[in-house]
Amino acid sequence: MAARTSCLSRRFHRLWLASPSLHFDRNYFSITRRFVKMVNSVLLGRHRSPPLETLCIESSFRSRCPLPFYPVLCWIIRADDLGVRHLCLTLEADTVAVLFWVIFSIESLESLHIETLHFTNRQAALPVTIFSTCLKSLSLWFNVDSAYLTRLIRELPVLEYLELKHINQIRIDLSSMSVKKLKLQVHSCNIMKLCFPKLDFIHLICEVSNMEMFQGEMPLVSQAVLIMRCPYKVPTLVLESMLKSAANVVELTLSIETSVDFESIYLTCCEMQLSFPRLENFKFSCSMCFLKLFQAEMPVLRKANIQISYAKEEFAPPVSNFLKCIANVVDLKFTIRDNLVRPQYNYIYNYISSLSVFVRNCSCLSALKTQSKLGITK
């Protein structure tokens, strides 16, 4: 729009040089040299006043030739001179690792998003002193050494939003007195410790079967999304610790994707004592054997979306026991995903009977929808 306006009058000719937002996408350039020349020209011609609000630089996933390191370094330094507040980078992992010390030296930075195109074994290095103390939003789609990550988060005093993806560390120890919203995606970890006294929302994707310990201090969390993708083994004790750390949630989404070791899961769940006294909205997507987790009544629960896949009948607790826990629900959706070649009609019959009794006894229920692959729908 600024380039088009400059064609109308001479006084608009260089108006675009004061644009508050700059977005450079390498996908539109087939030759790297032309892309570098264009970005150099725009950033060097950009006025220092008003300050640059947003700078976004995206490299190409399809390009075989990575961006040269030195021009990118110059762009970051120039962005610092222009007082950039929001920085978004999609670059090669090796380039990002080397640029870490420069990025966290930008004093004016308020939000930062870094996404890497490929994985790397090179560890990012932080500056001796972190100057980005105004940073409120941090999103790293990049595997950072746990020691650097711990130090970085602790030295950001006003950080409120934290998103970390592709975490691949033996030990993760994160703590912050200011973070209110947390998103984590963990690929490999043995020990995880989270200390966020002011946290209100957590979204945790755990793709780890060998996690040994989870310790969480999140007393104020009200919304939690826990997704576990464990094809070989479900760390049930870790799951228990996660759920207990989020015992005061108002909205809970729990999804466990696994297909093995139902007997040990069932036996472990029988020993767990979980309680959710404040839970109002519950979404549950797991195997039937995990229903044993929920034996205590949920007194204020009003909305539930339950999706369960079939397990062997001896490891599937009676649905009636779970329905008693959600006796005060107003809006209920109950789905059985039957993945058996020869379905167990006895269990389905018992499920229908239990649900019929629940409907007759639940005076507050106003909306009900049930469904299974066998065609049982209401």
Image (spheres, helix red, strand yellow):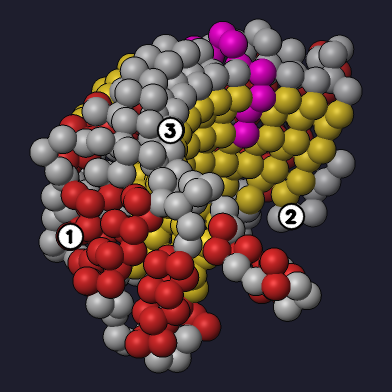
Residue lying at the far front in this picture: please name it.
10
Residue under label 2, please give it.
374
Mark 1: give few (<14), some (14-19) or many (20+) Cα within 10 Å.
some
What amino acid type should be assigned to the residue bearing mark 1? Val
Disc 1 designates what residue?
98
Q: Position of residue 373 (x, y in %)?
A: 71, 55
Give coordinates of residue 52: x percent, y percent. Answer: 49, 51
Most common secondary structure along the magenta stretch:
loop
Name the quarter where the N terminus is drawn: bottom right
- Residue at 73% in and 78% down: 7
Label disc, if present, on residue 86 of the rendered structure: none
N-terminal of the pair, mark 3 or mark 2, is 3
Earlier in the chain: of badge 1 and badge 2, it is 1
Label 1 secondary element: helix
Which residue does the image show at 28% across and 50% down from the upper left? 103
- Specify the amino acid type for callout 2: Leu
Image coordinates for residue 117, horizontal then vertical, percent: 34, 69
Q: Nearer the viewer, residue 183 or 72?
A: 72
Using the numbered discs, state the Cα–Cα distance from disc 1 to disc 2 in whole angstroms: 56 Å
